[in-house]
Every structure is written in C-alpha cells, then in structure tokens.
Image (tube, grey):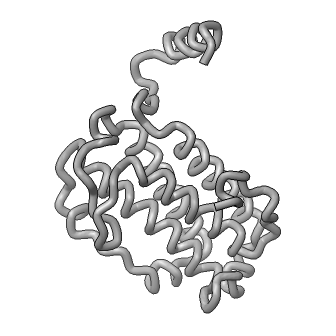
Amino acid sequence: MTGKANAARDALRARQGAGARYDAETAPQGDLLLARRGTAYFARKLNELRDEDLAAPSLRDGWSRRQLIAHVSLQARAMALALKVLREPLMAEEAEWQPDLALAATLPARALRHLFDHAVKHLDVEWRDLPAAAWDGPPIMLAGEEISPRDTPDLRARDIWRAAMELGSGGRREDVPKPLRDA
C-alpha cells in the first residue's frame, strides 16, 4: 500500500471505532480475499435458485444441490470452530458438535440458506479475530487432518469457488479468479 492508501485506511479505522474488526496484519490477505469473494459469488448463485430448485442434482457427481450447500456450510462451521480453539476454549456444545451432511441436506430450504449464511459469517469472524501470532501457530485439526491456520483461507477459497461452479446455477469458469482457475 502507498502512504496515501495507508493514511486513508487509518482514517477509516479511526472513524469506525474500537468495536470494528480487522484481519491481523500477518493474515494471508490475498487468500482471505479469494475466499471472501468466492463466498459472495456462491451466495449470489445460491440466491438465484428457487427453493424447489435446491433438490436438483448439482454438477458434483452424485450430489444434490442441497448436499453441496450443506457441505460448504458445514465446512465453514468446522473451520470456524477449529480456529476458535486458538483463541479460547470451545463451549461444551461446540466441542461435541459433529457435522452431519445427510441431516443438513434435509433441512427446509429457508433453514439450509440460513445455515450457509450463519456458518460463513462465523468463519469470517474467526478469521478476523485470529491473533497475528496464531496464523503461524500450532496446526488445527480439520476433517481428521492437521492443517496450518494460514492454509484455511486458501483451502476455503478453492472449495467454495469449485462448489459455486458445481451448484449448476449459471456459474462461469471465467468468473473464477485466475490464480484458482489456473491451479
């Protein structure tokens, strides 16, 4: 950033006050941007579907749109909880939570849409609240594998953009950012 851009950012943060949240300076800004843009794109494609269209097959082999929506929602929730552990202990119900894709896919359309909205907001809050040192801190457990907190935005970006294309609601390959499209 240029000196002028830094000054503008600092002025904005001063106007927003102490309650505003920002990503840590050490956070992987580019990967977070790709993940957040992918989430917005997926949300737009999801909102273009009528409730009755959610039961149709997705472009992911053997998956319905409902399963795909449930998958990206539960992935966001799992990442959020895994990252939260780096800041504070989980509440008992969080620690006992087990994702159930089959059950989530049966939710009424409105509830499935709310699951997506809430889970992605929870993940974004955890990314924003993650202390600078935690980005390179101990690995977290995600789907039975150890992963660096720093790798979560890249993993999410790749999965959410792929899912947006597989939703089968008009997503175009040329809409996917070039770094992900070329990977």
The residue positioned farthest toward the front in the image shown: 182
Q: In this rendered view, identify the residue nearer to me: 180 or 36.
A: 180
At 64% from the left and 88% from the top, the residue drawn is 61
- Examine the rendered structure and indicate whether residue 30 appears above or below residue 75: above
* Res. 55 image quadrant: bottom right
Q: Give 39 or 111, whichever is nearer the viewer.
A: 39
Locate the C terminus and report the quarter of the image it occupies.
bottom right
Q: Position of residue 24 (x, y in %)?
A: 40, 30
The residue under the point 45% across, 60% down is 76
Q: Quadrant of residue 54?
A: bottom right
The tally of labels here is: 0
The reply, left or right, for residue 140 in relation to residue 73 is left
Q: What x and y, as percent, mark residue 159? A: 56, 65
Q: Is residue 169 above or below residue 127?
A: below
Say which residue appears at 44% left-offset and 66% top-offset. 75
Residue 121 position, x and y percent, is 49, 49
- Can you say which quadrant of the picture contains the N terminus? top right
